[in-house]
Image (spheres, helix red, strand yellow):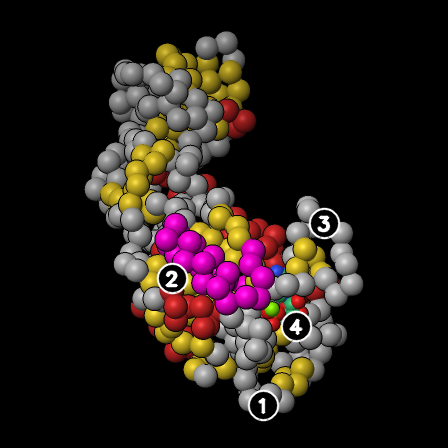
Amino acid sequence: MIDEIEALDRILSSTAKPEIEEVGLVAAAGRYLLEELRSTVAVPGFDQSAMDGYALRSMDLGSNGGALRISGLSAAGCENPGILQAGEAMRIFTGAPLPEGCDAVVMQENTLDEGGKLVVNQKVKKGECVRRKGDVICRGQLIASSGDRLNPGLLGLIASQGYTSLPVALWPRVAVITTGNELVDPAVGKLKPGQIFNSNSTMLQVALRRLGIQNVDLYHVEDQLQATIEVIRMAMHRCQLVLVVGGVSVGDRDQVKPALEECGANVEFWRVRIKPGKPLLYASFGENGQLFGLPGNPVSALVTFAIFVLPAVQRRLGACDKNLGMRRLTARSLSSITNQSDRPHYVRGVFDGDAGFLASACQTSHNTMGLAQSNALARIAARTCVNCGDLLTVHLLWEY
Ligand code: AMP
Ligand code: MG
């Protein structure tokens, strides 16, 4: 049995570097940028108005304003607004270039147009309502780094620099294999005594989809060694990331570990000091293949996915260190929580931004109701008691 930190280290250090494809900006949304980007144009690209109003020379007005002659117009897209002479004001709109000689813009709301004569009843300071060339971004400035998540704001900035495509990671091929004689596909049949519906298959597909992985090869296999070997072999042949669920514990029916030995996979570790999820298995195969054996209990399967599989997939997709894993924050515990076990306990519960974190009443690893009602995990160290009001590290389950 190994520690969770060591387990994660081994997983990340054996995760393949991303393979690159170039895609359009919209298709890159939510993915990770795989190169450093520099600006190609200054922002703003020229001195311009920040408001709809009048361009003027601040020195032409006194401390209580004054009157100016209205001459000409500069609208967004105007190529050359010309020159502003002494005593003149030019009608101007947001984003339009400033005429030569102008050093300020007065907002239209603070003026009166008296038939060609502009009356301003206040002082206008030099630089007011003016955006200067390059005051946001200079040409050649670093605007994005490798490993950054491509969110709408960042993609907007990149588009403003004239980029039309970006290098991102090719989607890995992923397989999910469920194991167990008791499982029935909800789309296929009714339950007979002793059977349950296969829910992990749906849950893991959805967890992968949140990372952008749309296509998953799905397999199901009964608890039988030869069949397990065959299905794992097939998945290893077709995919770079294989998730096998169930059949990794110590029961006589648990076939995954013996099957992996037959399939030529390298078992890097089996069993991690963590609760829930102790039976987690991790293996590498081929040039860049990774296989996770997740425990079958739905809560354990999802918790181990979130702690171990999620950062591995993010790394494979090119995420930098700060973008790995669930989002973490500090919150006050709204109840006392005791962990008597010798393993850290990832406790399910509800994080409510203002109030804090309330642990679910029932923490058993088959409690799918408690899992469905939770949005966060709090890590409680081994043999520790957290009192109501204490600060906790909370991991947000659906924010990645
Ligand atoms: P295992 O890890 O195979 O020993 O399974 C542990 C528990 O999880 C058992 O109660 C299984 O019936 C249940 N389980 C295993 N796989 C699934 C699945 N795909 N969907 C729902 N429950 C499962
Ligand atoms: Mg099983």
Q: Does label 3 or label 1 sit earlier along the sequence?
A: 3
Viewer-proximal residue among 241 and 328: 241
**C-alpha span from label 2 to label 4:** 25 Å
**Pointer 1: what residue?**
383
Q: Which residue is mark 2?
A: 290
Q: Is residue 135 visible?
A: no
Report how far apart the C-alphas of labels 3 and 4 lie in the structure.
25 Å
Circle 1 residues within 10 Å: few <14, some 14–19, many ≥20? few
Judge: label 2 CB < 8 Å from ligand 1.
no
**Residue 241 inside the magenta-drawn segment:** yes
Q: Nearer the viewer, mark 2 or mark 3?
A: 3
Nearer mark to the viewer, of 3 and 1: 3
Q: Quadrant of the N terminus?
A: bottom left
Count of numbered tags: 4
Task: Decide if residue 20 is on the left or right side of residue 66.
Answer: left
Residue annotated with mark 4: 365
Q: Quadrant of ligand 1?
A: bottom right
Is residue 238 toward the left or the right of residue 183 in the image?
left
Q: Earlier in the sequence, mark 1 or mark 2?
A: 2
Q: Is residue 381 above or below residue 17?
A: below
Bounds of the magenta segment = 220-245
**3 vs 4, front mark:** 3
User: Could you say whether the residue bearing mark 3 is in a helix, strand or loop?
Assistant: loop
Residue topped by disc 3 = 189
At which x and y percent is residue 365? 65, 72
Q: Amino acid at mark 1?
A: Arg
Which residue is drawn at the image coordinates 68% and 55% (left, top)? 184
